[in-house]
Image (spheres, rainbow, N blue to C red):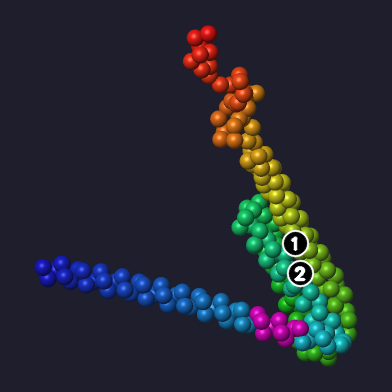
Amino acid sequence: MALVLFFFLALTFVASAIAVRRGVRALQRRATVARQELRRRAGDAALSARAAQPGAVGEVARTRKELRASVESARAILLAGVAHDPSLGEALALSEQLAGHAARLDAELAALVVGGERDRALIAERLPALRARAERIRASAIALREAANERARHDEGEDLDTLQERITLEAKALRHWAPTVPGAARRPSGRPVDGPASGAEGRLPGPEEARG
């Protein structure tokens, strides 16, 4: 009996330890995601502030801001669409590769003005090529985003066409109240009538008429 109790307590302790460890890991993951999101928002705010400045610092910041916006917009649209359209998976994979190129270019642009505008000659020399790379990445991101949007609109149109056809057929079926027996008239109660409902032809003969 004591051995069974010890075994039960040991299992309870192990299960509790595993649950606590999983809970701690989940909290750590959420905290990491929250820190990354906070860091990203702070970086975006600082970049927006620098983009409003004149000169090389502002130009580099504007290039970085436009680059980020294009790549993140394409990725967000593809992520939202792939849940309903798995065929967008390849496009999403390409957007992830494009995001890698954008991240490396963003780091190069940031390093170019890390000390402000002290080395204007270097900035003037390297910025045109970096800006050209940024435009190529932005064009690719825009192409992916527009293609995904067009595909979504096309699919939505096809779904609406199918729905309209079904509704049209159902509406016709609901309006089909003609009698099932061809040529049969109906009383207001719905019973078919074969002859006149009233008059001399429609009544039964009386006793004297029957004797005659």
| Spot occupied by residue 58 in the image (x, y as percentages of width and height) | 83, 85
Q: Which label is found at residue 145?
A: 1
| Spot occupied by residue 54 in the image (x, y as percentages of width and height) | 86, 87
Q: Residues within 10 Å of mark 1 (few under 14, many from 20)?
A: many
- Name the residue rendered at 51%, 17% in the picture: 206
| Spot occupied by residue 164 in the image (x, y as percentages of width and height) | 70, 46
Looking at the rendering, which quadrant does residue 11 occupy?
bottom left
Quarter of the picture holding the N terminus = bottom left
Residue 44 on the magenta span: yes
Q: Magenta stretch: dominant SS?
A: helix
- Name the residue rendered at 68%, 49% in the picture: 159
Q: Nearer the viewer, residue 202 or 38?
A: 202
| Amino acid carrying mark 1 in the image | Arg
On the picture, is 8 further left or further right than 185?
Answer: left
According to the image, label 2 marks what residue?
70
Q: Nearer the viewer, residue 146 or 90?
A: 146
Residue 184 on the magenta span: no
Secondary structure, mark 1, is: helix
- Indicate whether 18 appears above or below 56: above
- Indicate whether 155 appears above or below 57: above
Of the image marks 2 and 1, the number of the one nearer the N terminus: 2
Looking at the rendering, which quadrant does residue 124 occupy?
bottom right
- Name the residue rendered at 50%, 75% in the picture: 29
- Indicate whether 101 appears above or below 65: above
Q: Over which residues does the magenta segment extend?
A: 40-48
| Amino acid carrying mark 2 in the image | Ser
